[in-house]
């Protein structure tokens, strides 16, 4: 079969693939514990559901403008003013089918083949493939000190004459790290000096813990005008537990938004009117759900960290946000895909291999589920890996007998 070079170069999303496997195992009645999930389990906000059903009941479900309805754009503008203290015009925003599409059309609008996109590692699984979809070259930056916080030196060492953009995700998926004000200030300055695009993937910016504040990129921009090369991406998926609604957006200069809209117009056209209505409902409605989700996630993180602290050989960096803990399992297996497969097979615990995020030897454990799930999940992992644990483990009625180690 003849396939395109780009088509052949793109690897399947490992995280989505594992989620599909989990769904199949669950459907078969397996006692699965899902520590792989990237979606909160809370219900969608009531206002989202009400607006969605109201529109559905109207029976008039039509195309929308490519870059979003007037009301959707107003909701994004209001959001940007409230959370970023930045007043923008409707021509500065685009609504897409998830932040994923906003980032993708931004890449397509700015990247030429051979251009380089720089981002800290470990990274969100899609950045390298998205760059490759444009014929561009992903350049992951591994902090020299072995931490999850790159220094400016780490970043600048990877910037070349081919670099077109830097993309940052803070709080970060998979590490939960929030980049410091100093780092954001320096990187904004650097991008301005070098005339580089700076993309901020802010999907988790309200899901932060311990009073930590995510620096607002617009506080550090020297001149806020239509030449700005800052692209801010966000969405409803994580903060409002609305992953299935597929609405995200980007804020950028008007010319760039126009080009992104042109591209989106030929890809998918405007996002579904029903889903935009739901997103508007969530964004303009009461926000208590976001705070209660944040508190739940903070508590779940604490429980997860406590369990891991009592787990010999594993090391976890305390996440400052998101719903992931990125755990070093090198002492048990340096091959994270094999380890993840082993845990799914033997004790029915789904974890995400660090390799998918560019760092082998680690597993990404999600705190999205219940406390019970976290406790039992870690207990099962411990049982599977610790050679001193008893020979048998009961999962409900089912007896597991160790036939390894
Ligand atoms: C860092 C990051 N950016 C973007 C996305 C995509 O979000 P959306 O559901 O809005 O497409 C995700 C989803 O997992 C993510 O973790």
Image (cartoon, rainbow, N blue to C red):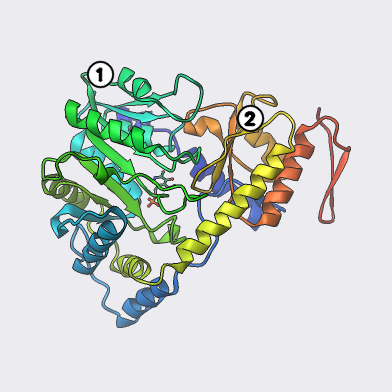
Q: Along the line of sight, which residue is nearer the eye, 63 or 172? A: 172
- Cα distance, mark 2 to mark 1? 35 Å
Classify mark 2 as within 8 Å of ligand 1 or not, answering yes or no: no
Q: Quadrant of residue 53?
A: bottom left
Left or right placement of residue 225 versus residue 287 in this view: left
Q: Along the line of sight, which residue is nearer the eye, 172 or 95? A: 172
Pointer 2 and pointer 1: residues touching (CB < 8 Å)? no
Whether residue 28 is visible: no
Residue labelled with disc 1: 160
Left or right placement of residue 67 versus residue 15 in this view: left
Residue labelled with disc 2: 338
Residue 151 x, y percent position in the rendering: 39, 25
Q: Quadrant of residue 183?
A: top left
Residue 223 x, y percent position in the rendering: 14, 41
Q: Along the line of sight, which residue is nearer the eye, 235 or 269? A: 235
In the picture, the quarter occupied by the N terminus is top left
Looking at the image, is 329 positioned above or below residue 200?
above
Q: Along the line of sight, which residue is nearer the eye, 353 or 291? A: 291
Q: Residue at x 30, y 65 (%)?
A: 276
């Amino acid at each position: 079969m003849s396939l395109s070079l780009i088509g052949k170069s793109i690897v399947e999303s490992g995280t989505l693939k594992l989620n599909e496997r989990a769904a199949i195992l669950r459907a078969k009645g397996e006692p699965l514990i899902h520590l792989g999930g990237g979606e909160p389990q809370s219900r969608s906000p009531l206002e989202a559901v009400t607006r969605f059903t109201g529109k559905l009941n109207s029976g008039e479900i039509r195309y929308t403008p490519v870059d979003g309805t007037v009301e959707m754009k107003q909701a994004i503008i209001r959001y940007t003013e409230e959370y970023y203290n930045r007043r923008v015009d409707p021509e500065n925003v685009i609504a897409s089918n998830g932040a994923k599409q906003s980032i993708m059309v931004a890449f397509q609008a700015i990247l030429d083949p051979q251009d380089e996109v720089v981002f800290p590692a470990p990274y969100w699984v899609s950045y390298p493939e998205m760059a490759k979809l444009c014929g561009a070259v992903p350049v992951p930056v591994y902090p020299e000190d072995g931490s999850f916080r790159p220094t400016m030196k780490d970043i600048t060492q990877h910037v070349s004459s081919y670099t077109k953009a830097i993309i940052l995700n803070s709080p970060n998926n998979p590490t939960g790290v929030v980049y410091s004000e100093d780092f954001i200030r320096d990187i904004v300055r650097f991008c301005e000096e070098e005339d580089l695009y700076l993309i901020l993937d802010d999907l988790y910016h309200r899901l932060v813990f311990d009073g930590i504040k995510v620096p607002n990129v617009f506080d550090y921009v020297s001149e806020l005008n239509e030449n700005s090369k800052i692209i801010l991406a966000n969405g409803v998926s994580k903060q409002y537990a609305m992953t299935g609604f597929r609405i995200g957006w980007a804020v950028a200069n008007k010319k760039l938004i126009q080009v992104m809209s042109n591209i989106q117009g030929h890809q998918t056209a405007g996002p579904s009117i029903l889903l935009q209505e739901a997103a508007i409902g969530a964004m303009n409605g009461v926000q208590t759900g976001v705070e209660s989700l944040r508190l739940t996630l903070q508590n779940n993180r604490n429980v997860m960290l406590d369990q891991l602290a009592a787990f010999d050989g594993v090391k976890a960096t305390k996440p400052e946000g998101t719903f992931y803990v990125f755990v070093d399992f090198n002492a048990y297996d340096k091959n994270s895909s094999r380890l993840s497969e082993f845990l799914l097979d033997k004790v029915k615990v789904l974890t995400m291999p660090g390799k998918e995020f560019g760092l082998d030897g680690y597993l990404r454990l999600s705190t999205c589920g219940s406390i019970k799930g976290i406790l039992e999940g870690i207990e099962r992992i411990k049982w599977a890996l610790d050679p001193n644990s008893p020979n048998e483990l009961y999962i409900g009625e089912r007896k597991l007998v160790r036939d390894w180690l």
